[in-house]
Image (cartoon, rainbow, N blue to C red):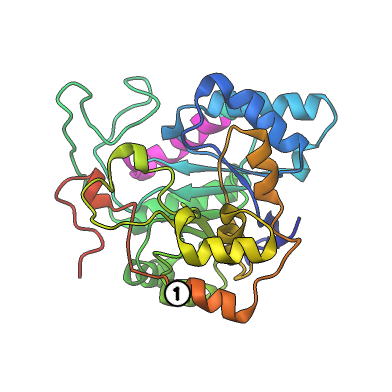
Amino acid sequence: MEAITLSQTNDKMPQVGFGTWQIPKEVTKEAVFQAIKMGYRLIDCAPPNANEVEVGQGIKEAIDQGIVTRSELFITSKLHSTHHHKQHVKLGIEKSLSDLGLEYLDLYTIHSPIALKYVSIADRYPPSRYYSQIEKNIIFDQVPLHETWAAMEELVHSGLARNIGIANINASLLMDLLSYAKIKPAVIQKEFHPYHSRKNLINFAKSKGIAITAFSSLGDTSYQSMGLFDNISGFVPTLENKVILDIAKNHSVSAAQVLLRWSVQQGIAVVPKSKNTERMSLNMQVYSFVLSDEEMKSIDDLNKDMRIFDPEFYLEGYPFYAN
């Protein structure tokens, strides 16, 4: 498994990891255990996934059976938007560590730079975007990113996180963050697939020594059930795109493997999720073939600047990416 060296610590982040979003908690323990057993070492978690306890159980089983040691794993989780105040950041990571059964995280990431009104862990956990689950209301909070980032840096100093990062950030806010960060983000996690490549942001981040982890590497597959594409006339799912299918046929691989290979060939980490062991295995097999320059360009040319994960969809009336 190839790895990306993180600039702040020289830690090695595996380039192909196992994502845990949308994996039902009743199968999460076994899915994580099987993932580690077949060679995954990066496990990507988040409190809203509502399965960190079960992820921790799968990790523990793999360690107890001697399949892996803790130091061989790269475990990540995220700070939820309701915990952006400096006095709440440590509470967030401590809860994830407790649920995962770990003493530290290899990477702790601000899930979104958008701050929501604080809801205590005792009142509701796992967290959601709603301040009240009954009223389904979203309340934004005025927390400057520099305050949250300073608290994130304290997590590094205290040994709770080896590396820190941020997700779903735009270029201008990243520039602002870099102007005051004493510890630079080690990683940015962002939506990245052929319909939404954002090459300018990626190239800028890389120029600053920041690694990239992609989410939604397979495009729209995880979002179809949410109805995001019902009203898009003529939309072709990424896994059904003729360009992708032709390249897959040329290499005798799956369309998903082509999409993952396109990312890793650009030095970007991927964290596809699956509870199907066959697909889990196939998702790792992206180093047995190489896409030609012409194939890479043909996939690049599919870009539509089409954002699937847009905060305005989930946080009504908050046009974070608007120009």
Residue 221 in percent (x, y) is at 43, 46
The answer, for residue 225, to whether it is visible in the render is: yes
122 magenta-colored? no
Snapshot quadrant of residue 18: top right
Q: Give the residue pinned by disc 1.
A: 199
Secondary structure predominantly adopted by residues drawn in magenta: helix
Residue closer to the observer: 282 or 96: 282
Q: Locate residue 140 relative to residue 244 in the image: left or right.
A: left
On the rendered image, what quadrant is the C terminus found in? bottom left
84 magenta-colored? yes
Seen at 58% across and 22% down, the residue is: 27
The answer, for residue 182, to whether it is visible in the render is: no
Seen at 73% across and 65% down, the residue is: 289
Q: In the image, what residue type sits under mark 1? A: Lys
- In the image, is residue 286 above or below residue 80? below
- Specify few, some or many for label 1: CA neighbours under 10 Å numbering under 14, 14-19, or 20 or more: few
Snapshot quadrant of residue 20: top right
The magenta span reads: 81-97
- In the image, is residue 308 above or below residue 298? above
Q: Locate residue 234 relative to residue 186 in the image: left or right.
A: left
Residue 301 in percent (x, y) is at 44, 76
Seen at 53% across and 54% down, the residue is: 164
- In the image, is residue 57 above or below residue 312? above
Q: Secondary structure at mark 1?
A: helix
